Image (cartoon, helix red, strand yellow):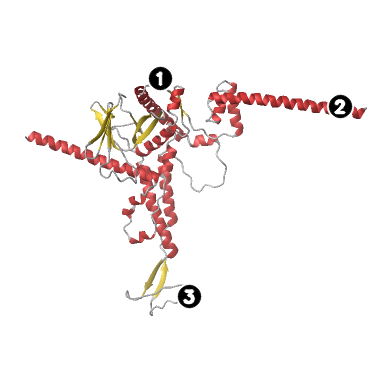
Amino acid sequence: MIFSNADQVIRDSIKDTKYLFETLRQKQINKHLDYYTNSETDKYIRKYFKAKSFQEVPSIMLNITSRFINKMARIYRIGATRTVNEQYDGLTKYKNIKLKHIERMAKLLGTISCRIVYNEQKEIFDYNPIYYYNAFFNENDPMTPVAITYPIHNLVHDVSMGKNMPYAYWDSNKMVVFNSSGKVIREMHHEYGILPFAFIHREPQIDQHFVEGASDIISCNETINILSSELALGGRFQVFGQPVATGVHADTNIVRAGTDEVILLPDGATFDIVSPKGDLRGLIEIIKMMIETCATNNHLSVSFSRSGGEVDSGIALIIKDLERKEDYMDYVDLWMMYENQIYDIESSIAFANGIRLPDSMGIDFNEPEYPRSTQDEIMFNQFMLDNNLTSYSKLLHNYNKDLKVDDASNVIQENIMENNQIRKQLNAEQSQSILSRLRQQNQEIE
């Protein structure tokens, strides 16, 4: 009996600890998303302002989070090129757009789940991000989930669900929808043979499945919102000042009106308007310093009110951005692994729907290019053509991504034919002009 009670206590303790951990993680995820979307972030700083004087100005809600996160997410800035077949290209026409958002959310939250879905009507794959989920693991692998549950969020203005918000359970064999009371709403067995979720991490895992998100950026954003609100309050006090009277009894009513009114004071009393002695410029410098420090820690650079001067060349930008470029190359290897994991899931889902995909996929991330002068661009393209490192059609495709390589080749052939016809016409017109001038000269001589 003692052992039974001990087992129950242990189970309850573990259950309570897990519940507390998951509740804190869910609150953190909500806070990160609020700061990214700049949605009602004043609720996070209200507790720091208890004085009534801070109600005289609105809370300042600056948003550096989305700018930092979007700059840090560079893998899908200009997309990726996958080499499989034409059928796969049609199935994944929106993949780059979806994965761009998923990469940003991974940078923000640390770890998210991506559900790969096959839309039978449109015959395309879709990629749905799951920001918050509970993971279940095999004892032999505490890093990779074998099943997950997550809340199925309804629309913000849809209150019909109330407390009976539905949840989903997925493993490698089935999907179950249940409500908050644990009642099963529906159950479906799938034939994927694999958990149709890819788990994307901001950084490689260390000692657990979940990876820490952009907490430093969120903390910096929260701090500068506090300091900016204080700056606005200090600015208002310095503009209007604080009325101060001396030598007057507390119950004396002093009426202050416009500039054409006279204020009557008792003998020996004084009335003045005093401005605070705070250093507002110093506060602005502190805010700048915090933003610059946070940016530097995340391989970003920030400039304030930069005007005039020469524009940096491409080489200068590469040298200036060298550390960030190295950081980008590290993430290329990480996302190469995620792309292959996603492709394995796509292949299993496609096979269950009667589609056979090749066993492997080629992937090439389109690296952001630094600006070059027109002359440097011409020389570079000519070098690539002279050494057979590219072709005219591929070169045109690089400048016009809407054209496929085959379409670009057809456009070039059409341009060659049109240009040759124009040259022939110009040559004929030029020959006629020369003959006409010769005849005219001969007539003048005669």
Q: What x and y, as percent, mark residue 417? A: 65, 24
Say what secondary structure mark 2 lies in: helix
Instruction: Identify which amino acid the numbered label 3 is placed on.
Output: Asp
Q: What x and y, as percent, mark residue 141? A: 26, 27
Mark number displayed over residue 130: none
Mark number displayed over residue 439: 2
Q: Earlier in the sequence, mark 2 or mark 1?
A: 1
Instruction: Identify which amino acid the numbered label 2 is placed on.
Output: Arg
Q: Residue furthest front?
A: 121
Which quadrant of the figure has residue 214? top left
Q: Which residue is mark 1?
A: 358
Depth check, front residue: 301 or 175 = 175
Which quadrant of the figure has residue 309? top right
- The crowding category of the residue bearing disc 1, from other C-alpha atoms within 10 Å (few below 14, some 14 to 19, many at least 20), is few
The answer to whether residue 138 shows anywhere in this view is yes
Depth check, front residue: 421 or 326 = 421
Which mark lies nearer to you, 3 or 2?
Answer: 2
- The crowding category of the residue bearing disc 3, from other C-alpha atoms within 10 Å (few below 14, some 14 to 19, many at least 20), is few
Q: Residue at x 33, y 56 (%)?
A: 49
Q: Residue at x 56, y 34 (%)?
A: 372
Say what secondary structure mark 3 lies in: loop
Q: Earlier in the sequence, mark 3 or mark 1?
A: 3
Q: Which residue is mark 3?
A: 260
- Alpha carbons under labels 3 and 2: distance apart: 97 Å
Q: Residue furthest right?
A: 446
- Alpha carbons under labels 3 and 1: distance apart: 88 Å
Say what secondary structure mark 1 lies in: loop
